[in-house]
Image: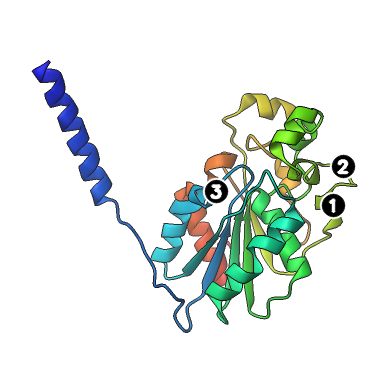
Amino acid sequence: MRRVITCLVSIFAILCILNCSVEKLTQNAKINPGQECVVLVHGYLRSSNHLSHLRNFLIQKGFYVVSIDYPSTTLNIQEIVGSYFSSQILDHCQNQTIHFVTHSLGGVIVRYYLKTNQIKNLGRVLMLAPPNQGSEIADFLSQFNLLNSFLGPILVQIKTDNSSFVHSLGLPKFEFAIISGDYTLDPISSFIIPGIDDGRVSISNTNLENRKDFLLVKRSHNFIMDAPEVQEAIFTYIKFGRFK
């Protein structure tokens, strides 16, 4: 018993040391003059914590980072933008250059936000694995009434049919780029999705014809934002308007 207790204490001590050694990156309460602002927008069924590693990376690169948190299963996209976007972005970013980095559904939300709101100091927009032309998984799940009630009104907004919300947005009128993945950890979803996919959305459905640049990486949908090569590509695009 003593040996077991000693082993547990040792494990706890190691975990504590590892946790304490992780750099806790912070930023000033207010954006500095001349500092550029990056707004992070998470995806469906997620929270801003899902982009925490990317947030720390961008803070380390000198950006002021604003993380938008929104409920994805109770409101539709229009209601999310009306309730969670303008005040947070303008209050935090003030008059500095504003970039957007989004994951999954976040890309569609930002497309709607920028279609209905003008930002005079808009910088660049980068979308990670966005369902720009809808999601085949949404097509499948929306067939079931119980799932529609549980997953909320956004589910039908991101269907692939031409009458869905995503197809009403038209092509963006701002500079943007897309990073997509071609690796899946979900064989069931990939069976439903035609073509090459990342486990949630097909590569073809992430794309829009007027994007400034496009990058394909061997990463899955849920973890694409944590890949070192993806984070470096995000930084390069924000700074130079291209991935290479």
| Residue at 56% from the left image edge and 79% from the top image edge | 94
Task: Give the alpha-carbon distance from disc 3 to disc 1, as whole Å.
Answer: 25 Å
Question: Relative to 74, is 4 above or below?
Answer: above
In x, y percent, where is residue 238?
56, 67
| Residue at 74% from the left image edge and 71% from the top image edge | 117
Determine contact: label 1, label 2, CB under 8 Å: yes
Amino acid type, callout 2: Asp
Q: Which of marks 3 and 1 is nearer the N terminus?
A: 3
How many residues crowd mark 1 within 10 Å: few (<14), some (14–19), many (20+)? some
In x, y percent, where is residue 40?
56, 59
Residue that numbered label 2 is attached to = 161
Q: What element carries label 1?
A: helix
Q: Horizontal placement of 74 versus 181: left or right?
A: right
Amino acid type, callout 1: His
Q: Earlier in the sequence, mark 2 or mark 3?
A: 3
Identity of the residue furthest to the left in this view: 2
Tell me if I can see residue 106 in this picture: yes
| Residue at 47% from the left image edge and 48% from the top image edge | 226
Name which quarter of the figure residue 202 lies in: top right
In x, y percent, where is residue 218?
56, 41
Determine contact: label 2, label 3, CB under 8 Å: no
Task: Give the alpha-carbon distance from disc 2 to disc 3, as whole Å.
Answer: 27 Å
| Residue at 35% from the left image edge and 61% from the top image edge | 25
In x, y percent, where is residue 64?
47, 70
Tell me if I can see residue 211 in this picture: no
Nearer to us in this view, 95 or 197: 95
Q: In which quarter of the image is the N terminus?
A: top left
Question: Relative to 137, is 179 above or below?
Answer: below
Q: Residue 47 carries which label?
A: 3
Residue that numbered label 1 is attached to = 167
Q: What element carries label 3?
A: loop
* Camera-side mark, 2 or 3: 3
